[in-house]
Image (spheres, helix red, strand yellow):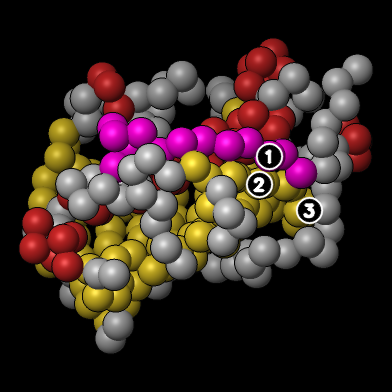
Amino acid sequence: MCIVPDIWREERIIESFDADMMGRLRPQTLFLFLMNSAWNHTRGTGFGYEAMSERNQIWVLIKAQISVKRRPKWGERIKIETWGKETVRFYALRDFTVCSGEGEKLVSATSSWMILDKTSGRPQRFDRQSDSFPWQAGRDEMETSLEKVQELKNGGELARFRVFFSDIDVNRHVNSAKYLQWMIDSHSYGHLETTEIKEIELNFLSEALPGDEVTVLSEETGIQELCSVRRAGDGRELCRGRFEWSGSE
C-alpha cells in the first residue's frame, strides 16, 4: 500500500523557458508548477490519475487563489509544498506554498476541487476511501473561499484566441493554466513590463473545446481588475478572474 506523505515537497529550478522577458517566472508556469505538485501528491493513491480513470472519474479544478509576494527569477531554486486540507460537501480543499532556496516565502495559494463522473459530468461524493488520505484540517495557508469571483458588469474586449491541439491536456480538456495565459497575454507589453501581479483569483466555470475561438473581457474596479474568458460562438463564460497589480519591483 502506498504511504502518502502529509505534506508533499518538491524542488525546481527556474529555467530560461519558464521565465518572461524580464526574467520572472511566468504566472501560468507558476500555476502549472502548483497543479503538478498536487498531481504528484496523489499519484499512486486512490486519488491519482490512473486510479481515478479506472473509476471513470476526473479531478476538476473549481477555484484557485494565489498571493504573490515575489515571483522567482531565472536560475533561482524554489521549494514547493502542498497538502490536502479537508473536504467540504463536494469540494476538496488544497493549499500550497512556494519558498526560495533560502527559505523566503514567495507564494501562498489555495484551491478547491471536485471529482466528476467522466460520462455524466456530475459531481461525486467522497467515499470512505478518502478517509485514508492524510487531510490536514486546520492547516490553512490561506482561507479558501468557495464564493465565485465577482461578475463583470461592463467588460470590454481585450483579445481573442483560438483553441489549438497543444492547449488540450491528457484529460482532453483545455489545461486550466491556459485560461490564465489568455488573460495575461491580453494585456499590453507596457502594462506587463511595468507592473507585478500580487493577487490572482480564478473560477473555472465551463470548458473551451478544440477549435473554439474565445474572447477575453476586462473591467477595472478600483485597484482590482476583473477578467472573463468566453466562448465567442455562444457567449458562454468559461473562466472568471480577479487580479491585483502593483508597480514592478
Give yes or no for contact between labels 1 and 3 (Cβ–Cβ under 8 Å): no
Q: Is mark 3 on a helix, strand or loop?
A: strand
Q: Which contiguous range is marked in magenta? A: 7-19
Q: Residue at x 35, y 24 (%)?
A: 168
Q: The residue tagged with tag 1: helix, strand or loop?
A: strand
N-terminal label among 1 and 3: 1
Q: Which amino acid does label 1 sit on?
A: Arg
Q: Is residue 20 visible?
A: yes
Q: Where is residue 51 in the image (x, y as percent from the top left)?
A: 72, 18
**Marks 1 and 2, the one that precedes in the sequence:** 1
Q: Distance between the residues labelled 1 and 2?
A: 5 Å
Nearer the observer, 94 or 74: 74
**How many residues crowd mark 3 within 10 Å: few (<14), some (14–19), many (20+)?**
some
Tell me: 242 left or right of 44. Answer: left
Labels 1, 3: front one:
1
Residue 225 seen from this side: no
- Give how far across and how far down residue 95 sits, in percent: 65, 54
Compared with residue 72, is residue 134 higher up or lower down, i.e. above or below? above
According to the picture, the residue beneath numbered tag 3 turns out to be: 86
Give me the disc on residue 9.
1
Residue name at image x 72 percent, y 39 percent: 8
x%, y% of residue 122? Answer: 61, 37
**Mark 1 to mark 3 CA distance (whole Å):** 19 Å
Image quadrant where one finds the N terminus = top right
Residue identifier under label 2? 81
Amino acid tagged 2: Glu
Which amino acid does the dot numbered 3 rest on? Answer: Glu
Dividing the picture into quadrants, the one containing residue 2 is top right
* Secondary structure state at the residue bearing disc 2: strand
Q: Could you tell me residue 83's position as x and y percent?
A: 72, 47
- On screen, 225 above or below 102? below
